Amino acid sequence: MLMRTDPFREMDRIVQQLSGASGTWSKPSVMPMDAYRQGDTYVIAFDLPGVSTEAIDIDVERNMLTVKAERRPAGKSDGVQMELSERPLGVFSRQVMLADTLDTEHIEADYDAGVLTLRIPIAERAKPRKIAIGSESGRKQISG
């Protein structure tokens, strides 16, 4: 149901993970995701721990799904000295090309325990259906 994205973007994602670089609006980091089919629904889950729902933006244009989020540093008060900072901060983004067989008009989004889950129903026109076979006697023949 999903079409693979640009392999160069995947290489950028790996380099960012290894270098520990934070994402910016012009060059966001890629967020990890899982995608699977569950009955007549396609499910995509994005890891976004520590991100508030107000900082998540989900858009669909034609068949391109875009998820952007921003994790800001925790408010620091005077007298706090950071000893270790390993949690990635900044902007995260992921674009996924959705197949024509998905109903992008009825996407549902839930956010729980740092996981954004999108549920996309399979379009009715894409579901298997039986085709009735007519009989020869039931057809009209046109004579010339």
Image (spheres, helix red, strand yellow):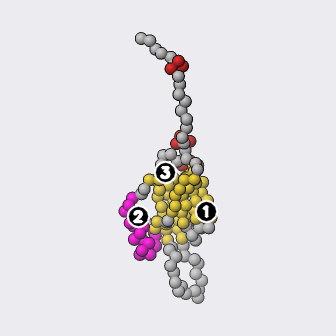
Q: CA distance from mark 1 to mark 3?
A: 22 Å
- Which numbered dot is residue 11? none
In this rendering, does residue 137 appear at all?
yes
The reply to whether discs 1 and 3 touch (Cβ–Cβ < 8 Å) is no
The residue identified by callout 3 is 1
Q: Amino acid at mark 3?
A: Met
Please tell me which of labels 2 and 1 falls first in the chain.
Answer: 2
Q: Earlier in the sequence, mark 1 or mark 3?
A: 3
On screen, residue 135 above or below 15: above
Q: Which numbered disc, 2 or 1, marks the residue closer to the eye?
A: 2
Of marks 2 and 3, which one's residue comes earlier in the chain? 3
Which one is in front, 27 or 94?
94
**Residue to which mark 2 is pinned:** 10
Q: Residue 87: horizontal and vertical position, in percent?
A: 52, 76
- Provide the secondary structure element on which disc 3 rests: loop
Local secondary structure at mark 1: strand
- Examine the residues drawn in magenta and state their main secondary structure: helix
Identity of the residue drawn at 48% across and 46% down: 100
**Residue named by callout 1:** 111
Q: Residues within 10 Å of mark 2 (few under 14, many from 20)?
A: few
Mark 1 is on which residue type?
Answer: Tyr
Q: Which contiguous range is marked in magenta?
A: 6-24
Query: In the depicted view, which residue is nearer to us: 133 or 13?
Result: 133
Kindly report the distance in space between the C-alpha atoms of the residues bearing marks 2 and 1: 25 Å
